[in-house]
Image (cartoon, grey):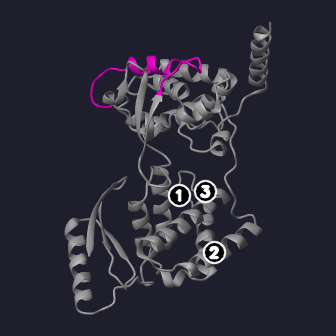
């Protein structure tokens, strides 16, 4: 009747109790220890044996709903941090008190006014839009797992979002087309040559452009996952697990030199000092990168823009879109297109190469 499932997530191990009884809605709760989960399961089973009805509870705290959503889905650092911020505002609200637009509007207003970063700036329209998307996803997850209705809460959230959108206070994220220029790349590589080598920033930076991997993927790579024969590496737990099975997205990815940098060569020259190839903290790498950009007065360049650089260089060299998708890990063309930002010179290069190939093929 009661099943206790162990769940390992970004925030550590959790224990989920799932109770399904004929004639009762399913009930799910997540706990930090196995003992707590076992105690809850025993209590619920006792209620059922005593003839009590087991049911979902709209008195549930929204913070618990968010915690269960995090433990029950794939969560990266950005998603986890953003949901923790949402909890700070809405975590103590009960579900039944979220069935009107008012609390959602107050939440958005508070997020706009209260800064959290070093500059203490309030959240902007894009961030608030993402907050509301996460809230809706958490509510839907709660409904699916516990077999309870959250229609009132979702209607209220949609109403609040509509009102905020009319005022321009929520919006979709803007598509970035920022790529590092050759001058900026040379400046960064030159800068790191003069720095201490606690972090091999030159190799990390070049490998990011050469492989198209996310920073978190780079710092998780293991020597045991390298396929030297085929110059490839197995990337574990990429973003976007299979939507049908929710299975983890593991991929074997070729390490090529299509960008002008040889990804496999950079990987292979790393010292073999442990299990991980790049045994560094991703936050430290990102912070070093940002400080270096600030020092060199390079504006509005993010580490993630290096994925744009990878995809754009692939396009410039005529690589098929399906091949680029296999290397970046994008499941849809629409997502991948956001990363492909070829310059005018890149377009001319591709067209010229294609025309030459066509001319040479003619008798």
- Which picture quadrant has residue 345? top right
Question: Does 319 sit above or below residue 155?
Answer: above
The secondary structure that most of the magenta stretch takes on is loop
Q: Residues within 10 Å of mark 1 (few under 14, many from 20)?
A: few
Q: CA distance from mark 3 to mark 1?
A: 7 Å
Mark 3 / mark 1, whichever is N-terminal = 1
Q: Residues within 10 Å of mark 2 (few under 14, many from 20)?
A: some
Tell me where residue 134 appears, x and y as whole percent.
54, 63
> Is label 1 in a helix, a strand or a loop?
loop
Question: Does 271 sit above or below residue 18?
Answer: above
Tell me where residue 328 appears, x and y as whole percent.
55, 35
Pointer 1: what residue? 116
Mark identifier at residue 121: 3
- In the rendered structure, the answer to whether residue 210 lies left or right of residue 275 reads right
Question: Does 336 sit above or below residue 59?
Answer: above
Q: Quadrant of the N terminus?
A: bottom left
Tell me where residue 235 appears, x and y as whole percent.
42, 36
Pointer 2: what residue? 105
Q: Which region of the structure is painted magenta?
A: 254-276
């Amino acid at each position: 009747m009661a099943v206790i499932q162990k769940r390992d997530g970004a925030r550590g191990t959790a224990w989920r109790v799932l109770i399904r009884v004929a004639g009762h809605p399913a009930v799910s709760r997540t706990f930090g220890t196995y003992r707590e989960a076992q105690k809850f399961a025993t209590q619920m089973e006792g209620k059922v044996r005593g003839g009590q009805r087991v049911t979902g509870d709209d008195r549930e705290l929204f913070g618990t709903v968010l915690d269960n959503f995090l433990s029950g889905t794939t969560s990266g650092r950005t998603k986890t941090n953003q949901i923790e911020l949402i909890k700070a505002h809405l975590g103590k609200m009960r579900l039944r008190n979220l069935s009107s637009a008012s609390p959602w509007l107050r939440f958005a207003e508070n997020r706009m006014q209260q800064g959290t970063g070093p500059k203490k700036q309030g959240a902007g329209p894009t961030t608030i839009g993402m907050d509301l998307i996460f809230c809706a996803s958490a509510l839907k997850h709660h409904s699916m797992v516990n077999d309870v209705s959250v229609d009132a809460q979702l209607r209220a959230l949609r109403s609040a979002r509509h009102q905020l959108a009319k005022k321009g206070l929520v919006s979709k994220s803007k598509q970035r087309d920022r790529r590092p220029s050759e001058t900026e790349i040379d400046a960064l590589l030159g800068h790191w040559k003069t720095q201490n080598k606690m972090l091999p920033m030159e190799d990390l930076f070049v490998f990011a452009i050469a492989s198209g991997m996310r920073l978190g993927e780079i710092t998780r790579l293991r020597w045991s996952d390298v396929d030297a024969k085929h110059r490839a590496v197995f990337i574990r737990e990429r973003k976007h697990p299979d939507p049908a099975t929710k299975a983890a997205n593991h991929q074997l990815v070729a390490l090529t030199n299509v960008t002008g940098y040889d990804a496999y060569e950079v990987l292979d020259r790393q010292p073999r000092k442990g299990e991980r190839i790049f045994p560094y903290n991703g936050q430290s790498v990102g912070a070093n990168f940002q400080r270096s950009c600030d020092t060199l007065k390079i504006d509005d360049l993010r580490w993630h823009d290096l994925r744009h650089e990878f995809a754009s260089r692939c396009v410039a060299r005529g690589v098929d879109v399906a091949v680029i998708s296999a290397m970046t890990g994008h499941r849809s063309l629409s997502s991948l297109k956001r990363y492909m930002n070829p310059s005018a010179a890149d377009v001319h290069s591709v067209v010229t190469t294609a025309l030459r190939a066509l001319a040479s093929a003619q008798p």
